[in-house]
């Protein structure tokens, strides 16, 4: 299954690079990819400066959000858990919208909206953890979920307040970011995203057997020598890193971390040593193809990534819910 998934991922990346709103012949595409001197300069810039970094970015974002959702569902033993459960997306949204509406342009250009959004995500995560922690006790999954919901509601209210009182022009820009978009992604954003994804994937694979034991319950996992509290803390920090950088670059992209881990389980089962690579590849494929559809369906206009993804995610989400109901 994994070799086939890798092949599909390569085809999806090729489609994302070669297709778009600009009309490019096959000979021009080949010349552009080979960096030939005969390649049209304008079209070459479209492919190398816009399409390729965008495809790489959305692929890594899809992989990261799927990995974060998988780890959250395992650590909390909750099939409905997703990366945004910790209030991360709401914190990033409030910080980014506040920066776009209230900060001078010189400040946002110097720091960058992605960095401000990442700081907001980190603040929301730390607030959730501080509300969930009780001295002398390990983190309780239910308390973490409730704290995450409370923090999310608080930051959502703050975002709504910023949008209500803000300048209409600035509010329009902020709304575009809130609906999710990978437009404007360039090469300098990729190294940090790649580093976080590689480190998170390494940590996840290294703890795969312990994650399997976590599914048996806290007591049985501890009897097998697994420190469940430490595993959960590791998962939470990996989640904030992956989700924070994803939200910072592409805005709010929902459903990826909720649905795709379940689809990966249907394909390869629940053993994390096999499940993690499959889920990561599936997440990358999905977001690359959805982003391509966003670019071409209403060309030259571009659909928001989060909107189209939510529309496409509804049917499989209903299918998963019906399957869970039958099991119970």
Image (tube, rainbow, N blue to C red):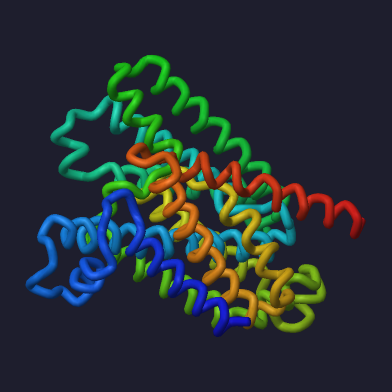
Q: Quadrant of the N terminus?
A: bottom right
Q: As drawn, is 204 to the left or to the right of 44? A: right
Query: Where is 283 relative to 206, above or below?
Result: above
Q: Quadrant of residue 116?
A: top left
Q: Quadrant of the C terminus?
A: bottom right
Residue 316, percent from left and from top: 70, 53
- Return the residue nearer the eye: 204 or 226: 204
Residue 161, percent from left and from top: 44, 20
Q: As drawn, is 234 to the left or to the right of 319? A: left
Can see residue 88? yes
Residue ID at (53%, 60%): 286
Residue ID at (53%, 30%): 154
Residue 280, percent from left and from top: 53, 70
Residue ID at (56%, 62%): 66
Query: Where is 63 relative to 148, above or below?
Result: below
- Return the residue nearer the eye: 325 or 34: 34
Residue 105, percent from left and from top: 17, 32
The residue positioned farthest toward the top in the image shown: 165
Q: As drawn, is 249 to the left or to the right of 5? A: left
Residue ID at (67%, 60%): 73
- Return the residue nearer the eye: 269 or 235: 269
Can see residue 136? no
């Amino acid at each position: 299954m994994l070799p086939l998934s890798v092949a599909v991922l390569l085809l999806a990346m090729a489609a994302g690079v070669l297709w778009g709103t600009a009309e490019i012949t096959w000979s021009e595409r080949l010349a552009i990819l080979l960096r030939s001197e005969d390649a049209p300069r304008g079209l070459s810039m479209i492919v190398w400066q816009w399409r390729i970094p965008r495809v790489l970015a959305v692929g890594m974002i899809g992989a990261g959000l799927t990995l974060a959702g998988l780890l959250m569902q395992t650590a909390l033993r909750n099939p409905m858990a997703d990366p945004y459960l910790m209030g991360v997306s709401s914190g990033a949204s409030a910080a980014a919208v506040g920066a776009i509406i209230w900060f001078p342009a010189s400040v946002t250009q110097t720091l960058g909206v992605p960095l401000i959004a990442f700081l907001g995500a980190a603040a929301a995560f730390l607030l959730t953890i501080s509300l969930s922690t009780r001295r002398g006790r390990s983190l309780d999954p239910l308390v973490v979920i409730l704290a995450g919901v409370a923090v999310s509601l608080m930051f959502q209210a703050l975002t709504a307040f910023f949008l209500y009182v803000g300048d209409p022009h600035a509010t329009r820009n902020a709304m575009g970011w809130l609906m999710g978009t990978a437009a404007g992604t360039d090469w300098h954003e990729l190294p940090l995203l790649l580093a976080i994804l590689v480190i998170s994937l390494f940590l996840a694979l290294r703890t795969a057997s312990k994650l399997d034991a976590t599914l048996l319950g806290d007591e049985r996992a501890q009897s097998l020598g697994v420190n469940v509290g430490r595993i959960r803390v590791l998962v939470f920090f990996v989640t904030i890193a992956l989700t924070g950088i994803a939200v910072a670059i592409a805005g709010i992209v929902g459903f990826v971390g909720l649905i795709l881990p379940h689809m990966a389980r249907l394909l390869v089962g629940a053993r994390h040593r096999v499940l993690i690579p499959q889920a990561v590849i599936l997440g990358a494929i999905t977001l690359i193809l959805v982003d391509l559809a966003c670019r071409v369906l209403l060309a030259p206009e571009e659909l928001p990534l989060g909107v189209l993804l939510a529309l496409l995610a509804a049917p499989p989400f209903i299918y998963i819910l019906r399957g869970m109901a039958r099991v119970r």
